[in-house]
Amino acid sequence: MVKKDFVVCNQSKLCYTVYGSGSDKMLAFHGFGQSGEVFSEFEKACPEYTIYAFDLFYFGESKWEEDMDVLEPGFWKTWMERFLDKENIDKFSIVGFSLGAKLALLTFELYYTLTERILLIAPDGIKPSLLYRMATQYVVPKAYFRYIIRHPNTFFRLLYILGSLRLIDKGTGYFVVRQMDSLRKRRKAYDAWMLYRNIWPSNPTIADLINRSMIPVIFILGEKDRVIDGKKIVPLMSRLSRAEVVELPCSHHKLLEKTAYWLAADNG
């Protein structure tokens, strides 16, 4: 079964795609530049689940029409309460890929008593990126970020310099360039980076809730991933009393596909 639905708050709309009809529930959050449809292969891999794959704001069919340009955790809770009430969900597992891991961990923190399992695939936000912090938290870099929407060449040169000085990972630089190689993409990148700038999971808090609740956690990484490597999960993983780490032979953009295969084999 596949269907699309949404919840509304004020003038904005949070869309999601429903895959499968299993008795267990899974909330899935995609990465930058994607939509919830990237989880379509999870339907066959996880037949015991009904999967609710969200379109994050500024991606897919979700619409952000608020006066504020930042999503605060309290407002996200309002969205999740409306969704859970609408779908009559009282227990669920959570999956987050890349950017989506930030929303996955925030959702867990808000609803840890309802969470049964956490799957983090190349999770972003556990170890803050210097580039992201600079571009979204400080006045001068934010102004520069707006400037490069129409004048990108100086930014691309800056990325090269930062990568050469090892101030950012070169894989991160390549990923950013791919996501900003057109005017439309740069506008979307700016809006999305600004919107999620206050969503930063507290590793001590998350770890404490996981350890006390004894919730199973699986980290899935790509052996060839140049965007999110194993070092970036250490600030959270090192605090957990137990966690499973799985490395799959692929790059960042192939991880969801390979994860679906891995889940199917694990269920088989």
Image (cartoon, rainbow, N blue to C red):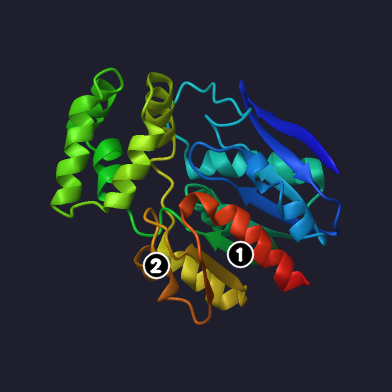
Q: Where is the C terminus found, in terms of image quarters?
A: bottom right
Nearest to N terminus: mark 1 or mark 2: 1
Q: Mark on residue 230?
A: 2
Q: Residues within 10 Å of mark 1 (few under 14, many from 20)?
A: many
Q: Check disc 2 and report its element: helix, strand or loop.
A: helix
Q: CA distance from mark 1 to mark 2?
A: 17 Å
Pinpoint residue 75: horizontal percent, then vertical percent. 54, 38
Reply above or below: 262 against 185.
below
Query: Could you tell me how many numbered marks the image carries?
Result: 2
Residue toward you, 52 or 245:
245
Q: Check disc 1 and report its element: helix, strand or loop.
A: strand
Residue at the disc numbered 1: 118
Q: Which mark's residue is nearer the viewer, 1 or 2?
A: 2
| Marks 1 and 2 close (CB-CB < 8 Å) | no
Does residue 92 appear anywhere in the picture? yes
Q: What is the three-letter code of the residue carrying label 1?
A: Ile
Reply above or below: 187 against 174.
above
Which residue is rendered at x = 26% and y = 44% of the image? 131
Does residue 139 appear anywhere in the picture? no
Which residue is rendered at x = 42% and y = 68% of the image? 236
Q: Where is the N terminus found, in terms of image quarters?
A: top right
Pinpoint residue 99: horizontal percent, then vertical percent. 47, 47
Pinpoint residue 176: horizontal percent, then vertical percent. 35, 39
Q: What is the three-letter code of the residue carrying label 2?
A: Gly
Which residue is rendered at x = 17% and y = 30% of the image? 140
Q: As drawn, which residue projects farthest toward the top?
A: 150
Q: Residues within 10 Å of mark 2 (few under 14, many from 20)?
A: some
Task: Using the rendered view, name the quadrant where residue 118 is placed.
Answer: bottom right
Q: Mark on residue 94?
A: none
Residue toward you, 187 or 221:
221
Task: Using the rendered view, name the quadrant where residue 190 is placed.
Answer: top left
Reply above or below: 4 against 162.
above
